[in-house]
Image (cartoon, grey):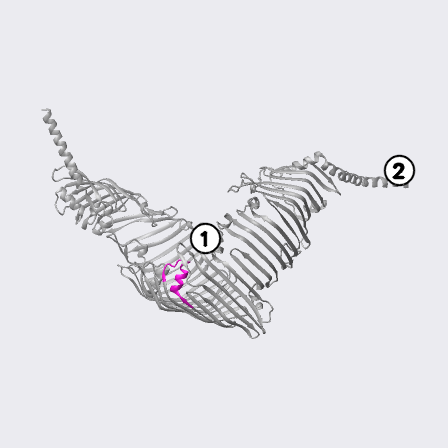
Amino acid sequence: MEAERKSTPAENTVRKFRAKRFLLLPAIILCIVILVMLFLVPAYISSEGGTNLIVSKINDSIDGEVTVGSLSMGWIKGVKISRLNFTDQTGNTIIDARQITAKPKYLPLLAGRVHLNNATIDEPVVSIRVAEQNTTDQQVGNSRPQQSGGTGQIPALPIENVNLIINKGNVKFETAGVEQAGKTLELRDINSKLAIRPLGKKSSLDVSMAVAGANDVSQITASGELKTSSGKWTLANSSGKLQIDVNELDLSQLGPLFTILKVDLEAKGLVTANIDAELKKGQFENIDSKVKVLKLDVSGQALKGDRIFTESFNADAKLSTDAKSINIESMNVKSDWLSADIEGTVPRDLDSIDDFLRYDSADTLSGKFDCDFAKAISQVKNISGFKKDFDIKYGRLSGDVATKIVSGKKIVQGKIKLWALEGTFPVKHIVISKPIELEAKLVSEKKGITVEKLLMDSYFANVVCSGSVEQMNYNADIDLEKMQYDMGQFFDFKQQLAGRGIVTGTGSWKDRVLTSSGNARLSDVIVKTPDGKVLTESEAKLDFDFKADAEKKLISVDSLKARAEAGDITVSNLIIPMKAGPVEEMNFNMLAKVDLAKTAPWATVLGGMDEDLQIAGVASSDLKISKSKDIFHIKTTQTSVKNLKVGYPGQEPFVQSEVMVSFDGMFDIANKIYDIKTLKIVSPQINVTGNLTNSQAGNDIKTQGNFRADYDLAAISTIIAPYVPSGFNITGQRSDNFVFSSNYPKNQPQQRMANLNARASFGFDSAKYMGIDIGKTSLDLRIDNGYLSIRPFTTTANKGRLSFGANANFADEPRLMKTPGAIKLFENIQINAETSDALLSYVNPVFADAVEVTGILNFDCEKLAIPLQGGHKNDIAVTGTLAISNMRLGASSLLAQIIQLTGVGKDPLITVMPTRFVLENGILGYDNMVMDIDGKKVSFSGSIWLDKRMKMNVELPWEVSGDNIVLPLKGTVNKPKIDTGKLLEQQFQKEAEKLIEKGLEELFK
């Protein structure tokens, strides 16, 4: 094998050069590509093809069309666009600019940020035709970009640093579809410079423009600078300056601008304003403003029908602010209906008031105001929420405040007076009997603050306070009748009031805590209701002791005790938040001892208790109430009612020597959910225990309960009387379980019954209803997903049989209890006068006013539907066949008329042949109800309304002729009468027919 040859130095040098050339070649190619891009990209973008490509991409992304005369780009000179035009799809918005130049920083564009050293828009002209407002989204000024296909808005890029300069631009707003006069807004000669800098840097604004209307041109300039904090855009730690000058701006020309902003306002008037403001760390160090408005007239739907008007308005103000106060060098306001002059220091909060009132504080406040109250209220009546028929014709509100510093004392005194008030509210004339005056005088010195005068004087009330801030006595004397006379002109009092109220007590203000204790006493109180009832209270007292902490925003009631003839109520350790949210924990007790008989009249009038309910007894309760976050815990273990007596007129009262109640429940008031862990009611004849919860799981609410009750039906029949049909009486001892639950969407509480599931047993030893004595009965009730089922059962009734079974769908509206099919409802039951009056009088008027009714009733029911809710009487539906045998009626007025016409005996035996009838839509009808009255057939047909109207005929044999005659019934079911006038008419017609027939026979003999 030949030995390996070694490379020579020359050959090694050649190899190294070739390797370096291989590595250097891509770098050279990359440099060439970059150089080509540097030259070609600007050249391509500046070419016609590049410009068309960019414009086409823009037009694919916007609602409208952009055209440009030319576009050029340079890495150093920036971007230049000449003759730019934009027209939106509707043709109502047009933007023209002679030239736009900008010098962007290109590298930030790769990160999605627009960074412009300078941008200039030369002679821009913006023309917007604004359609008149309507309720659709198609109106101009409210066009929405369509998101289908390739159409949409150009996505906004984060702006980091922008200088934008607009030179000699024009903007024109024109309302479409209306006369041009007064409907065009044109902004001319716009010169503006907006420099937006990053957070923590100083941004600036310099704008001037001419606002051209139909007849006049006004000038507006605004300039300023603002340096924000480095964290976020906020005025809290910002500093800067702002200057605004407006020269006779005609507000009527702003209509198109209001339209495009979707603000429904119409404004008239000339505005001249000069405002200079300096901001330092969020506080205005200096504000110097002058505003003058002539013939201001503002209206429109945004004001809810109100109209703000003044012939002239002038306001001059020089002021500054700090964290605690507003320092007014001067403030003067003058208009047709208001004048005010103020100077000095206005505290911003309670801490500032303390500082202001210090004897060694140099802060003072003086001023006065006078307001035409009637004109002021009339201009903001709807905005303020007053009723439409509220109208103040005359009235004046004036006041003044003054501060003096004399010999180490600061004296602050002021007065407010409302007088000459007259008008209508609502639809009644009001005249305030006497001016309402508030007057105060405070003297601050080293030893403390003395209240020399603090009073309110009016026709119906006088309030006087005196003493020091740390030890103040107060007294208020109120005449209830006079108060109603004056205040009743503004507020609707349903009852007439009389009596006197006196409030006395002491109070102190220290370390931002108001402490007060005292009592209120009402004497010789008389309340007259609109229906003539009179309630009286010789004396009622309220003792109170509370603290109001302005720092913690809490009112702490150490004790509150009310005493009256009806009983006593005491509340202790109560905490009331002065605003939402501050109270996380709360614990207080309430003791009550009330005479129910004395409370009942007040509860009937003021609380809506059933006025027929008769109640007596002494109730005592000890409630413990606590709150943790939003959950209230209410518990009582010592609630009792002794010698309870409950009754209704005409019924035996429910009487218990003592009823004990224990209760423990949690309530989330905000979410309307609760958990009653235990509820127990114990008395000699009632024992109920159970629990009830209403909880939320996701978007659903679940309500469930479980109760066991041992009770005497006869004892509770009076209590349940309002909830069962009138006259329904039951007896028996029961031990029943009631279990129910319902799961339904929180936002659909009406689905509670539709989703109900329940199991219950119920029964009685005996019951009586509508003259029917029902024997011992047990019922099983099931409700599955809102579907009620009562299993068919049979029991005795008036020596016969009653059969029944039903179901109901609680999802239906209205809810109807229906028989599942045909059923023999009554079989051979004995009827009586009560049954006749309650049931049979709706079937036939012969049963009206009948007494001593006897007979055997059978009723085969094909269909029965009974509403489970009130107000659906016409939804009762019954179809069936009725038959009565061996019936006798006493004192029936209609039967007496039938007896007279037919000639049957006075106490006839009656049989009602099987008759099918239908009751629906509030009308019962049948074609032929035949009654056998002592062997003579009497037939009824027609309709009877549930309101006792009727349209019926009766066919019967007339004793005189022996022929059957058909006569209508007049009157109502309660007072029926056979129309005998028709009888004479029929007989006359028959006799006439006989004469004619006889005459014809003679003629053709």
Residue 879 in view of the camera? no
487 magenta-colored: yes
In the image, 320: left or right of 434?
Answer: right
Task: State which mark lies toward you, 1 or 2.
Answer: 1
Mark sitting earlier along the chain (1/2): 2
- Classify residue 957 by image quadrant: top left
* Three-letter amino acid code of the residue under disc 1: Ile
In this rendering, would 258 be left or right of 992?
Answer: right
Q: Quadrant of residue 458?
A: bottom left
The residue that mark 1 highlights is: 701
Badge 2 marks a residue whose secondary structure is: loop
Locate residue 511, reporting x and y percent. 55, 70
Which residue does the image show at 36% across and 49% down from the upper left?
788
Q: Name the residue under label 2.
A: 2
- Which quadrant would the C terminus be assigned to in this image? top left
Could you classify mark 1 by the number of other residues whose Cα lies within 10 Å: few (under 14), some (14-19), or many (20 or more)? many
Residue 190: quarter of image: top right
Assess whether mark 2 and mark 1 are in contact (beta carbons under 8 angstroms). Answer: no
Q: What residue type is labelled 2?
A: Glu
CA–CA distance between discs 1 and 2?
99 Å
Question: Extreme bottom residue here?
Answer: 447
